[in-house]
């Protein structure tokens, strides 16, 4: 067995040991990582590219330095956009909406209520992170927060 297989198996063992309430957050985080890797300019998602750029940051060629800074800014923007655009997978969105409807009708079981609270906590945390990411993105781009927030945040969404 090679090192990658062993690492994957160790991760699988850790996931199998997680309590059910943590799986929702893990699934969402994995969706974010998938998005982040798909959005990377080289398509590799390899952190060594970032380290290579950082090692060459003091390059004597001013144009190369500008390109490096632009690349780093673009990478930072992509990461912030990943946070802003993060959402529940469709099946989880549908489940959360069903639970919310049952809450309004006062027909939730205790187990469903706990599940609803788990979703609500996660969504509240994401919303706070979304605001922070838009603030950072506005600063990075030199634009007004309110305008950028309105551009990036869906107005008619429950999630």
Image (cartoon, rainbow, N blue to C red):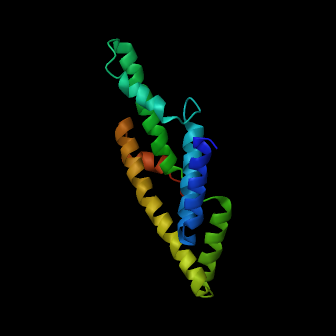
93 sits left or right of 144 in the view: right
Tell how many labels.
Answer: 0
Using the image as rendered, state which of residue 77 and residue 17 is in the foreground. Answer: 17
Quarter of the image where one finds residue 80: top left
Residue 156 in view in this figure: no
Residue at figure coordinates x 56%, y 57% from the top left: 28
Q: Residue furthest top?
A: 61
32 shown above or below 96: above
Residue 3, image x, y percentages? 57, 42
49 sits left or right of 95 in the view: left
Using the image as rendered, state which of residue 127 and residue 38 is in the foreground. Answer: 38
Residue 68, image x, y percentages? 40, 23
Residue 65 in view in this figure: yes
Residue at figure coordinates x 50%, y 64% from the top left: 123
77 shown above or below 90: above
Residue at figure coordinates x 67%, y 67% from the top left: 94
Quarter of the image where one finds residue 66: top left
Residue 39, image x, y percentages? 57, 38
Q: Quadrant of the C terminus?
A: bottom right
Using the image as rendered, state which of residue 98 and residue 42 is in the foreground. Answer: 42
Q: Quadrant of the N terminus?
A: top right
56 shown above or below 29: above
Residue at figure coordinates x 49%, y 39% from the top left: 78
């Amino acid at each position: 067995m090679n090192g990658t297989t062993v690492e994957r198996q160790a991760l699988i063992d850790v996931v199998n040991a997680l309590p059910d309430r943590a799986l929702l957050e893990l699934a969402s985080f994995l969706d974010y990582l998938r998005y982040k890797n798909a959005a990377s300019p080289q398509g590799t998602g390899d952190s060594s590219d970032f380290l290579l750029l950082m090692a060459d940051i003091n390059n004597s060629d001013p144009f190369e330095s500008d390109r490096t800074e632009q690349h780093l800014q673009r990478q930072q923007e992509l990461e912030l956009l990943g946070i802003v655009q993060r959402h529940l997978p469709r099946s989880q969105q549908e489940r959360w909406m069903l639970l919310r409807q049952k809450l309004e009708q006062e027909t939730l079981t205790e187990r469903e209520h706990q599940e609803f609270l788990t979703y609500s906590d996660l969504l509240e945390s994401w919303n706070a992170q979304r605001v922070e990411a838009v603030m950072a993105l506005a600063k990075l781009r030199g634009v007004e927060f309110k305008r950028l927030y309105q551009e990036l945040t869906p107005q008619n969404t429950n999630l």
